[in-house]
Image: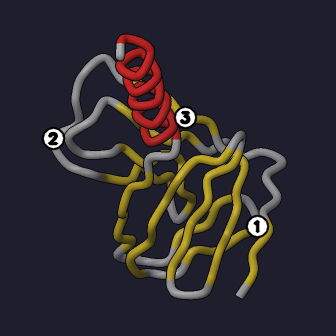
Amino acid sequence: MMFRKLVFGVATVALAVAGAASSSYKVTLDAPLSIGSTELKAGEYKVEMQGGKAVFKTGKTVIEVPATMGKSEHKYYRTGVVTEGSKLQEIDFGGTTENILFEGKGISATGTK
């Protein structure tokens, strides 16, 4: 009986860690923005980090862009984007301290439809 509880506890923790590692967020872009040579059209996207890439999904379109996950010292009040002109620099996720950072130099992206 004790062994069952231990196995159940370990499995629960493993699932929680796996679920947290694959968090996805929704972000709405009010205008077209670019990351390197890739343009993201205005609209709603599901965004998640997979390794060193941010994966943007909308409908059947999937766009992968090199990015890094960051943390802020404070919790973001709402989801927002940081831009420089029409270049996307950062996405801050509301209700969390997490953000995705994009570097403007040497970015190449892949997309499928």
Q: What's the CA distance linking mark 2 and mark 3?
A: 18 Å
Judge from the rendering whether residue 98 lies leftward or rightward of residue 21; answer left or right. left
**Circle 2 — which element?**
loop
Q: What's the CA distance linking mark 1 and mark 2?
A: 30 Å
Residue type, label 2? Tyr
Return the x and y of residue 57 as percentages of the image width and height.
55, 72
**Circle 1 — which element?**
loop
Mark 1 Cα-neighbour bin, 10 Å: few <14, some 14–19, many ≥20: few
Q: What's the CA distance linking mark 3 and mark 1?
A: 21 Å
Return the x and y of residue 4 as percentages of the image width and height.
41, 22
Mark toward the viewer: 3 or 1: 3
Closer to us: 86 or 69: 69
Quadrant (top left, top right, bottom left, bottom right) of the C terminus:
bottom right
Return the x and y of residue 16 as percentages of the image width and height.
40, 34
Residue type, label 3? Met
Q: Which mark is residue 37?
A: 1
Indicate whether 91 appears above or below 9. Answer: below
Mark 3 Cα-neighbour bin, 10 Å: few <14, some 14–19, many ≥20: some
Judge from the rendering whether residue 102 lies leftward or rightward of residue 105; answer left or right. left
Residue identifier under label 3:
69
Quadrant (top left, top right, bottom left, bottom right) of the N terminus:
top left
Q: Residue at x 46, y 37 (%)?
A: 15
Task: Kindly indicate the quadrant of the structure image that contains residue 20.
Answer: top left
**Circle 3 — which element?**
strand
Residue type, label 1? Ser
Q: Residue at x 75, y 81 (%)?
A: 112
Q: Which mark is residue 77?
A: 2
Q: Earlier in the sequence, mark 2 or mark 3?
A: 3
List the single residue furthest toward the left: 77
Indicate whether 51 appears above or below 12. Answer: below
